[in-house]
Image: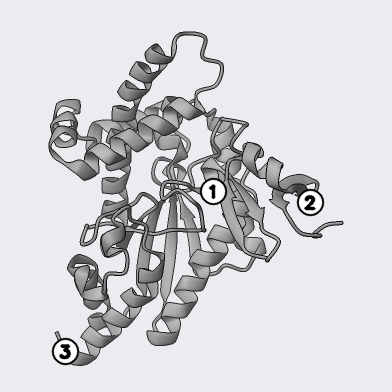
């Protein structure tokens, strides 16, 4: 690799490192060289002098648990996260003039039936994200979802198509979870979210946990399928992830906003503006104990500990 390509590639990756989402705190401050897969991907694009593309599966829909979120539409948590991602692309353009763009790959329809969120809520959420991107002038961001791939097919048909074509088998996934600590942590994290987000369950706690463990396999299968579909449509992109990732993994975990838990996302929580002006994410019920609700444009947006909105 030519020295200038290597330096530029490392400089680009170094802009992402402070935001790396990982549960491996012993290596949380790893240098760019600890991510050879991403360095190779970035170097291939830099060598060609082309704009760099990142893909980020996520931003699916709001959690159906009203103790966590303000409603089914995106709010200040998503606004701040999109602005942050756009700012990263802007920073990259300063060290690499061809620039960078990021494709938000909204995956709500991929597993909406497994997480108990209606498809019309998922559509409304994604449409509002597009509105945010336009209104906020985030020209380096774009949104990609199943409508871009399969048009107006019924949602169940879209899910079946993606699953049948790309998803790993349950047996293969089960074997991986039993053998790989990271896969096991992901499975446990998704199971926990499913348990927390299941509303109106009338059976026993143990029955709910068994059902959520089964559904967690389906969520991971379809998430893997969605990842393969994204790779097919964006073959030279650098893959980011909203899930914690170990050092050197093929996916780079990225933290969107400050939160006490490495698994917390804007769609599972509510934004709180602290008295010092900084932001964090937490469940709605906790944010309501600490701050006052702020409404923007006639809708609940976030909580604040300061005098904002008085």
Q: For this view, does 110 lie left or right of residue 132? A: left
Please give the residue where the numbered disc 2 appears in the rendered image.
297
Q: Position of residue 211 (x, y in %)?
A: 36, 17
How is the protein colored in the picture? Answer: one colour
Whichever of callouts 1 and 2 sits on the residue coming sooner in the sequence is 1
Q: State the residue at coordinates (56%, 50%).
A: 281
The crowding category of the residue bearing disc 1, from other C-alpha atoms within 10 Å (few below 14, some 14 to 19, many at least 20), is many
Near mark 2 (Cα within 10 A), the count class, few <14, some 14-19 or many ≥20, is few
Q: Quadrant of the N terminus?
A: bottom left
Q: Nearer the viewer, residue 269 or 98?
A: 269
**CA–CA distance in space, label 3 to label 2:** 51 Å
Q: Position of residue 17 (x, y in %)?
A: 35, 70
Precedes in sequence: disc 3 or disc 2: 3
**163 to the left or right of 87:** left
Q: Is residue 157 above or below residue 132?
A: above
Query: Gap in Å between the C-alphas at discs 1 and 2?
Result: 19 Å
From this view, report whether residue 232 is shown above or below residue 112: below
Numbered circle sitting on residue 18: none
Q: Secondary structure at mark 3?
A: loop
Residue 2 disc label: 3
Name the front one of labels 1 and 3: 1
Answer yes or no: do the residues labelled 1 and 3 have beta carbons within 8 Å?
Answer: no
Helix, strand or loop status at disc 1: helix
Tell me the SS state at disc 2: loop
Which of discs 1 and 2 lies nearer the camera? The answer is: 1
Viewer-closest of 261 and 182:
261
The answer to whether marks 1 and 2 mark residues whose Cβ atoms lie closer than 8 Å is no
């Amino acid at each position: 690799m030519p020295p200038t390509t290597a330096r530029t590639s490392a400089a680009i990756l170094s802009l992402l490192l402070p935001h790396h989402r990982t549960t491996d705190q012993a290596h949380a401050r790893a240098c760019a060289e600890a991510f050879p897969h991403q360095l190779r991907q970035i170097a291939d694009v830099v060598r060609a002098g082309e704009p760099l593309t990142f893909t980020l599966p996520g931003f699916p829909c709001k959690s159906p648990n009203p103790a966590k979120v303000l409603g089914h539409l995106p709010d200040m948590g998503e606004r701040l996260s999109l602005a942050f991602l756009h700012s990263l692309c802007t920073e990259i353009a300063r060290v690499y003039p061809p620039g960078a763009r990021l494709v938000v790959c909204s995956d709500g329809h991929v597993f909406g039936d497994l997480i108990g969120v209606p498809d019309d809520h998922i559509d409304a959420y994604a449409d509002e994200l597009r509105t945010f991107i336009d209104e906020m002038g985030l020209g380096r961001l774009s949104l990609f979802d199943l409508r871009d791939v399969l048009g107006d097919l019924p949602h169940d048909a879209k899910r079946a198509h993606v699953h049948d074509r790309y998803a790993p088998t349950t047996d293969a996934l089960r074997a991986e979870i039993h053998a790989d600590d990271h896969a096991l942590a992901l499975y446990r994290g998704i199971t926990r979210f499913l348990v927390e987000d299941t509303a109106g369950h009338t059976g026993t706690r143990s029955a709910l946990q068994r059902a959520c463990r089964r559904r967690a396999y389906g969520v991971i299968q379809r998430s893997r399928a969605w990842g393969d579909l994204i790779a097919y449509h964006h073959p030279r992109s650098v893959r980011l992830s909203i899930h914690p990732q170990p050092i050197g993994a093929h996916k780079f975990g990225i933290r969107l906003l400050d939160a006490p838990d490495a698994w917390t996302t804007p769609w599972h929580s509510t934004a709180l503006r602290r008295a010092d002006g900084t932001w964090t994410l937490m469940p709605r019920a906790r944010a309501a104990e600490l701050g006052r609700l702020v409404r923007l444009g006639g809708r609940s947006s976030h909580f604040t500990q300061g005098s904002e909105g008085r």
